[in-house]
């Protein structure tokens, strides 16, 4: 694709300079929104102008459709990772689509057009900031992977100089756009802060719910007697507190699986710390895969039991399954225990690992 862009974009720019004047009526600056259609009119008459306009309509329609397809896949992944609300995963029974994602994206895009009063120049500027920000994050993510996960098997290895050069050029372009029209950054920041706030609420929702529960205890204490409270499994000491406590319990109910090859204290401890810090769960399964006919390594169960007594805020369970670790085993465990693959974790594999990370179907690498 980049080869096509490198050839056609400069070629079209040169042709436009050869066909149309730069300034004046009917020039490139005057017809900046319809330059190609104006070129068709000048070169081959009105019929070519109509053909170019229809072709542009079809191309832009394809771009809009691609945007919806891309955002549905992105939000579905974020929702399955519990980064955005999970109700977005609901599927329309009539068409089998995630209607909440499609409608939500339509409302966000429409609101931006209405706020900008249909100003396409400002709208393109907001898109430019979003695109450049995404490219910057891609480069930073690549460098973080090279630094933290250097031994992950991969087909293409980007050298450090290309990563640093690419990020530097993107940041320079970002600053250039900022100096051109700083007001566009305001609209971009509004939407960026809104999305960031939603993600923050999802990550800290248990803490926020506990804060709400504490305030309710102070403002609306429960009128039940202590004897009645003792019979209640969700005693909170606040009116309506049982509902909040139930929400907290439902949030922390999904378990997390960590595939572990050996009873290495350091690896298991790092996995537990990661889950406690980054995942909203109270249950962690340490899963060990071993060949048929061979016993579980000595001391594995006792090691997990020891960590279960050390970390009191998280319940650790040990699970051993017969068979080699790989995509088939991941699929079997996912179906057997009804466990989403994105809530299954592994240690960073070595170069001699027989499978790729992508072949595991969404299993996440959490330790080095």
Image: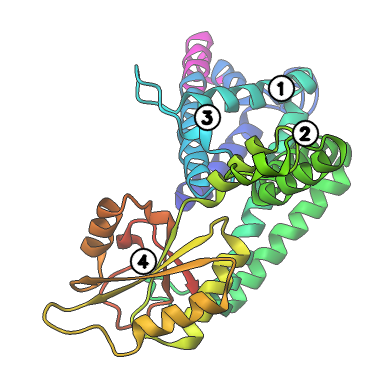
Foreground pick, 253 / 65:
253
Dot 4 and dot 2 residues touching (CB under 8 Å): no
Residue that badge 3 annotates: 101
The answer to which of marks 1 and 3 sits earlier in the sequence is: 3
The answer to which of marks 2 and 1 sits earlier in the sequence is: 1
Q: What element carries label 2?
A: loop
The answer to which of marks 1 and 4 sits earlier in the sequence is: 1
Instruction: Give the class, few, some or many, for how many residues have Cα within 10 Å of label 4's Cα (few <14, many ≥20).
Output: many
The answer to which of marks 4 and 3 sits earlier in the sequence is: 3
Foreground pick, 224 / 239:
224
Cα gap from disc 1 to disc 4, whole angstroms:
39 Å
Residue that badge 4 annotates: 357
Q: Any magenta on residue 46?
A: yes
Q: Where residue 206 sits in the image (x, y, percent)?
A: 67, 49
Cα gap from disc 4 to disc 2, whole angstroms:
55 Å
Please provide the residue range marked out in magenta.
Answer: 43-56
Instruction: Give the class, few, some or many, for how many residues have Cα within 10 Å of label 1's Cα (few <14, many ≥20).
Output: few
Cα gap from disc 4 to disc 3, whole angstroms:
28 Å
Residue 223's label in the rendered image is 2
Please tell me in which quadrant of the rendered image residue 237 appears.
top right
Residue that badge 1 annotates: 111
Q: Is mark 3 on a helix, strand or loop?
A: helix
């Amino acid at each position: 694709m980049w080869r096509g862009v490198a050839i056609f974009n400069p070629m079209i720019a040169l042709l436009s300079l050869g066909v149309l004047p730069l300034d004046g009526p009917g020039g490139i600056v005057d017809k900046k929104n319809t330059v190609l259609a104006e070129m068709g009119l000048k070169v081959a008459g009105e019929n070519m102008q109509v053909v170019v306009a229809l072709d542009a309509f079809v191309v832009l329609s394809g771009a809009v459709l691609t945007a919806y397809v891309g955002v549905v896949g992105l939000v579905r992944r974020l929702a399955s990772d519990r980064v955005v609300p999970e109700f977005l995963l609901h599927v329309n029974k009539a068409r089998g689509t995630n209607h909440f994602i499609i409608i939500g994206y339509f409302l966000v895009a429409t609101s931006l057009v209405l706020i900008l009063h249909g100003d396409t120049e400002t709208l393109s500027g907001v898109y430019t900031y979003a695109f450049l920000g995404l490219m910057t994050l891609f480069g930073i993510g690549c460098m973080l992977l090279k630094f933290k996960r250097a031994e992950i098997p991969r087909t293409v290895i980007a050298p450090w100089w290309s990563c640093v050069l690419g990020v530097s050029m993107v940041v320079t372009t970002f600053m250039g756009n900022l100096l051109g029209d700083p007001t566009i950054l305001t609209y971009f920041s509004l939407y960026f802060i809104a999305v960031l706030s939603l993600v923050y609420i999802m990550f800290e929702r248990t803490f926020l719910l506990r804060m709400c529960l504490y305030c309710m205890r102070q403002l609306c204490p429960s009128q039940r007697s202590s004897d009645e409270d003792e019979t209640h499994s969700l005693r909170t000491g606040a009116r309506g507190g049982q509902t909040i406590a139930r929400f907290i319990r439902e949030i922390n109910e999904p378990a997390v699986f960590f595939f572990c090859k050996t009873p290495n204290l350091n690896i298991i401890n790092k996995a537990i710390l990661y889950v406690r810090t980054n995942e909203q769960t109270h249950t962690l399964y340490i899963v060990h895969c071993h060949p048929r006919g061979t016993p579980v390594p000595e001391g594995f169960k006792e090691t997990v039991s020891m960590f279960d007594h050390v970390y009191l805020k998280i319940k650790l369970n040990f699970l051993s399954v017969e068979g080699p670790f790989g995509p088939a085993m991941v699929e079997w465990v996912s179906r057997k225990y009804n466990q989403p693959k994105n809530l299954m974790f592994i240690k960073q594999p070595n170069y001699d690992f027989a499978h790729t990370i992508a072949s595991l179907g969404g299993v996440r690498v959490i330790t080095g």
